[in-house]
Structure formats: structure tokens, C-alpha cells
Amino acid sequence: MTRILKLNEIKKILEGIDPIKIIEEGFIAYSQGKVVVPPIGEMIFDDPKHPGDCHIKYGFIKNDEYYVVKIAQGFYNNPKVGLPSTNGLNILFNQKNGAIECILLDEGYLTDVRTASAGAIAAKYMAPKNVNRIGIFGTGLQGKMQLQFLKSVVDCRKASIWGRGKEQLKKYQDDMASSEFEIETTMNSNDITNSCNLIVTCTPSKLPLINADQVLKGMHITAMGSDTSEKQELESKILQKSDRVVVDSLSQAGTRGECFHAIRNGDIKKDRIIELGNMITDKNFQRANDDEITIVDLTGVAVQDIQISKAVYEGYLSLNK
């Protein structure tokens, strides 16, 4: 019988799971060629009044019990009418016979968890040893979750948040009042780049938010908003200026993300890019000192959805023996 898990139950199960650990294991398996991930399916809705996109990511780990199909969508004007900007679900199938084992009606939350986990993994290996202040571009749920997940890998508890409006920034600060972080807000990107040496960008921007001349020695940037070919958060010359450039998926870097723009513009060659799973397992690919400029470009890989879906389902089975 197919199990159906709703968001409240999923959140309870997640309390007993270390998502950063399982997502890290997934990236390693992916870079070792143990995961089958077909090209992303996507629909882009360019209606100016209702801009949005829908992504279908799917795949399986070889010789595993399951395969996963994930549908996630973002409609960025939804908050104006009282609706969440993201939604979605994950479907877990039996790899041996195709039976639907579990439908995870997570409303997009598992995508946020696995994305925030990836941000923490990026910082764990590539952020400077001494982080003086964390900068976040984006005031939505992902902007909040990135900061929360960074607590487990970075000691710094000072943060500056960039947003497009005072109302959004005020809400961010109110929502994060109990987060243990000392939070400042700004609408000027220079305030972030002049004071923060660990920066995370998590917006749906189609125009660069950070220019190359704003990037200083010793800075690390994790960019995760550019999950389609139309989106871009970093001027592509930033990647040319960087000492190390890491992506979650080399194959996806050819069609989306900051590396896609930089390769297309001739600012970087693909042979300079390191895949995240390989960086995790090889210290030679990790940050060497606090003076390096490093970039991690995350476009989201189906192995993350596989790992988080499996963990929740197996957690459910364990709790209901």
C-alpha cells in the first residue's frame, strides 16, 4: 500500500535525521558515478504578473532500493496574495518493481532542507577558517534556512542580510529574532561585500547582484539561486577572478547556473571547475588558505532529493515498526 506523508509528519521525522550528512554522502556517490540522473525537466512561466518555474528532477542510486521523482515549483509573486512562493512533492518508487512506496507531500520543504544542507556543505569545506561575518542575499525561506544550517559548520554569529525592500527585511529580522545571530539588514550590496567573507546568494535574480570589483581577497560565495539558464546572481567575471570554482554537477554546469554564464561568456573554461563530491573527498581541491577567493555554484541535483526522500521514508518505517 502506498504511504502518503504530509508536511507536519515529515517535519517530525526530520527531527531524527542529519540532512547535512546524508546529502554529503549523496554528492560523493554522484561524483563517483554511482547515481543515474537524467537531464532536468523544467517549465518556465514568463508571465510578468505570475512569473514562475517548475522543475522535475529524478534519478536513482545504482543497486539501491528506490528511485525518486521530485516536482518543485516557485512562483515568486505568490507572497503578494498570501500564498507560499514554493511548493512541490517527492514520489518514492521501488527500484525493483516500480511500485509507489511513498508520496511525500512536503509542499517544497524537503527541497529547501536539501538545498540548505548543500549550502552548509559548501561552507564546511570552502569557507575561510575565520569567518568574520556572514552575508545573505535573499529574504525568503531559503535565505533564513541557509543561515540556520550554517550554525553547524561555522562559528560566526554575525550576519548581514540584503533584500529588495524594507518590509521584507523587517520581516526577515523579526522571523530570525531567536536565531542566535546578530542580524543587520541592507538594500545596498556593498554593505554585504565590504563586511562579509562568507556570502550566500539565494534569489531568483536574472541580473547579477554582485560584480567582480566587489569581490575581495579571502571571500567565499555560495551561489544557489541560478537554477535555470535565465537566472544569474554573480557577474561571470567573478568566476574568472576566483582561485577555486566548485559545482554540484559538472553536466548541469553546461546548461544552468553561474558557471553556465561564465563558460558562455568565455570567462572560465570547464576544465577549471571541480565537482562538489570530488572536492569533499580530495583535500587538494579544498580551500588552501584564508586569502583564496572561492565559489561554489549549486544548481540542485536529483541525488539530494533521492537522499532526503529515502531518509524520511526509512525514518517513517523505523517509527512505525
Image (cartoon, rainbow, N blue to C red):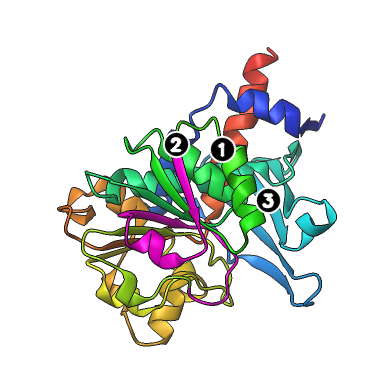
Q: Amino acid at mark 3?
A: Val
> Does dot 2 land on a helix, a strand or a loop?
loop
Residue 206 on the magenta span? yes
Spatial CA span between label 3 and label 1: 32 Å
- First in sequence, mark 1 or 2: give its number: 1
Residue at the top extreme of this rendering: 321
Give whichever of 47, 283 is nearer the camera: 47
At which x and y percent is residue 278?
Answer: 30, 53
Q: Nearer the viewer, mark 3 or mark 1?
A: 1
Spatial CA span between label 1 and label 2: 8 Å
Residue 62: assigned label: none
- First in sequence, mark 3 or 1: give its number: 3
At which x and y percent is residue 148?
Answer: 49, 37
Q: Residue at x 80, y 33 (%)?
A: 4
Q: Which residue is mark 2?
A: 181
- The local crowd at label 1, few if under 14, some if 14 to 19, many if 20 or more residues have their Cα within 10 Å, is some
Quadrant (top left, top right, bottom left, bottom right) of the C terminus: top right
> Does dot 1 land on a helix, a strand or a loop?
loop
Q: Residue at x 58, y 23 (%)?
A: 15
At which x and y percent is residue 191?
Answer: 40, 61
